[in-house]
Image: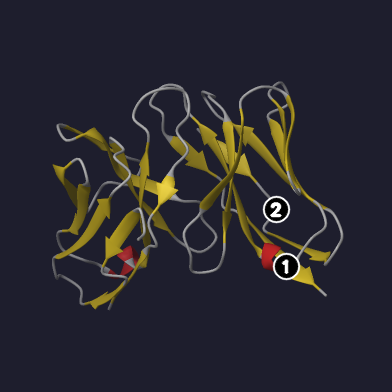
Amino acid sequence: DADVTQTPRNRITKTGKRIMLECSQTKGHDRMYWYRQDPGLGLRLIYYSFDVKDINKGEISDGYSVSRQAQAKFSLSLESAIPNQTALYFCATSIGAGASYEQYFGPGTRLTVT
Amino acid sequence: GQNIDQPTEMTATEGAIVQINCTYQTSGFNGLFWYQQHAGEAPTFLSYNVLDGLEEKGRFSSFLSRSKGYSYLLLKELQMKDSASYLCAVGMDSNYQLIWGAGTKLIIKP
């Protein structure tokens, strides 16, 4: 079984709708991240969480919110989807402490907002 | 601001060697990562350099010069499965975030 899973894998929604993307991990990592990837751009950080009680905004948090329901679960919500939020969304995890913070990525959610 | 530059696309021949460069200008530095990403898939970790010099791992090697803000990924004995995007990312010591380059798409031809 995959260590980091994301649901749904693909989603088409309409402008103005609220949607939630979910991420679960079995790696036991404290740190979790949400990124979006657009063609020609690097991965951009939306939100990150160092533990259940610690949520931080990333580079592009406007229009998004998150919930860390448990160590293993981190959800991303688009309150009112707009077409420029069409992108590939990745969840990632990393070890919470120490110098090594290689990130482990989920398979991605391809979101289209029409 | 933070800036990471990589070539957009490179082409190489199966069995050959290719070097993918990455230059960075960031306000902090706590290591440089290389990830591989096949089309439509998740990035996967390849290497991490925090000290100057060359790190070798099988067919892949990664080099870092902190004074020059420069790294490269060297791929030897290229195989068709190496066709992918290669992402360079700098770790920030202030908040443990990664700043990502846009990636280099590597096309391998027979």
> Is A43 on the left-hand or right-hand side of B9?
left
Q: Which mark is residue B9?
A: none
Q: Position of residue A91 (x, y in %)?
A: 34, 52
The residue that appears at 14% across and 59% down in the rendered structure is: A79
Q: Quadrant of residue B63?
A: top right
The residue that appears at 87% across and 59% down in the rendered structure is: B16
**SS label for mark 2:** loop
> Is B98 on the left-hand or right-hand side of A12?
right
> Is B17 on the left-hand or right-hand side of B93?
right
The residue that appears at 71% across and 23% down in the rendered structure is: B52
Q: Is residue A59 above or below residue B64?
A: below
Residue at label 2?
B7
Q: Position of residue B30 (x, y in %)?
A: 53, 24
Give the chain of mark 1: B
First of labels 2, 1 by sequence position: 2
Q: Give the amino acid at mark 1.
A: Ile
Q: Which mark is residue B107?
A: 1
**Which colouring convention does the figure follow?**
secondary structure
Depth order, front residue of A85/B93: B93
The residue that appears at 45% across and 61% down in the rendered structure is: A38
Q: Quadrant of residue B80?
A: bottom right
Residue farthest to the right? B16
**Badge nearest the viewer, 2 or 1:** 1
Q: Position of residue B58 (x, y in %)?
A: 74, 45
Q: Quadrant of residue B10?
A: bottom right
Depth order, front residue of B91/A93: A93
Q: Give the amino acid at mark 2.
A: Pro
**SS label for mark 1:** strand
Give the chain of mark 2: B
Badge 2: few (under 14), some or many (20 or more) residues near its Cα, within 10 Å? Answer: some
Q: Is residue A29 above or below residue B82?
A: above
